[in-house]
Image (cartoon, grey):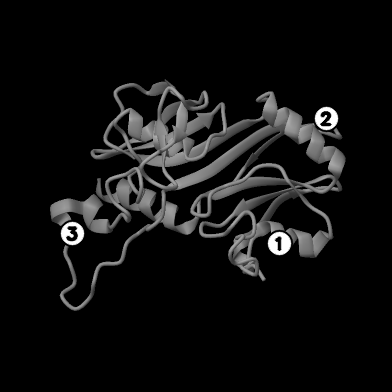
Amino acid sequence: MAKKKAIEIIFEDDHIIVLNKAPGMLTLSDRYAPDKASLHKYLLDKYGEIFTVHRLDKETSGVILFAKTAKAHREFSMMFEHRNIQKFYLTLLEGQLYNEVIEVDKAIAPSTTQKNKMIVHARGKASKSIFRTKETFKKFTLVEVEILTGRTHQIRVHAESIGYPLSVDAIYGVRPALKASHIKGRKFKAKMDKEERPLISRSILHASRLCFVHPITKEKHDISADLPKDFRAVVSQLRKWD
């Protein structure tokens, strides 16, 4: 059973349900460990029938949408296919961006040398992301990313390709975790008897907003999700010490 803290319902009606996924939570059940908690399994147990509209990686937090009916699911599938749904993410990149807005239009393909890794390559699928600066620090930039396509690891791959990888990313970045010492620098004072714990130890990526027209009621929705605790802690430390 999924932990209650991992299940935060933002919006719900007879046709759809929108949640704020906690980091570390699976969207779908693991094929090798079907009993592991996942949002899909939780919703299936709760409603008896549920349809997956899109997915978020295990480490990614934020807005995720499910359909309760086959009709809503079909409509959403068409909307995603025709790019009629806007998806925005927040992340923290290495360095200060050379422009406040950077558009990246680079095809993405699976790596032929490393399992579970994607790369920019002409043989890949067309992919487009727009990076917009939200807040600039000495060593990092907080950005909002709008993705116009939904490729695997798209933001992480595109960020690395322009020289500004995610500040925390075990595959595409420079470190697997971010600690206060990385932010404070010389101002950091280590405690002699304690090992420093990381502020965040996952890919620092949060699905912050989802904008769409309801497939049944035709109402416009602009749904956002608050940052999780670990991401908030990083931003708080940056604003305090940077």
Outermost residue toward the front in this view: 112
Residue flagged by tag 3: what amino acid is it? Phe
Instruction: Judge whether 2 appears above or below 202 on screen.
Output: below
Q: Position of residue 125 (x, y in %)?
A: 52, 26
Percent of width and height locating residue 3: 62, 69
Q: Secondary structure at mark 2?
A: loop
Labels 1 and 3: the sequence-earlier one: 1
Question: In the rendered image, which residue does mark 3 sit on?
Answer: 188
Rendered-image quadrant of the C terminus:
top left
Q: How many marks?
A: 3
Q: What's the CA distance linking mark 1 and mark 3?
A: 43 Å
- Residue that numbered label 2 is attached to: 218
Specify the label residue 89 is tagged with: none
Q: Secondary structure at mark 3?
A: loop
Residue drawn at point x = 66 percent, y = 58 percent: 39
Left or right: residue 30 compared with residue 204? right
Horizontal and vertical percent for residue 208? 55, 42
The amino acid beneath tag 2 is: Lys
Are the residues tagged 1 and 3 within 8 Å (C-beta)? no
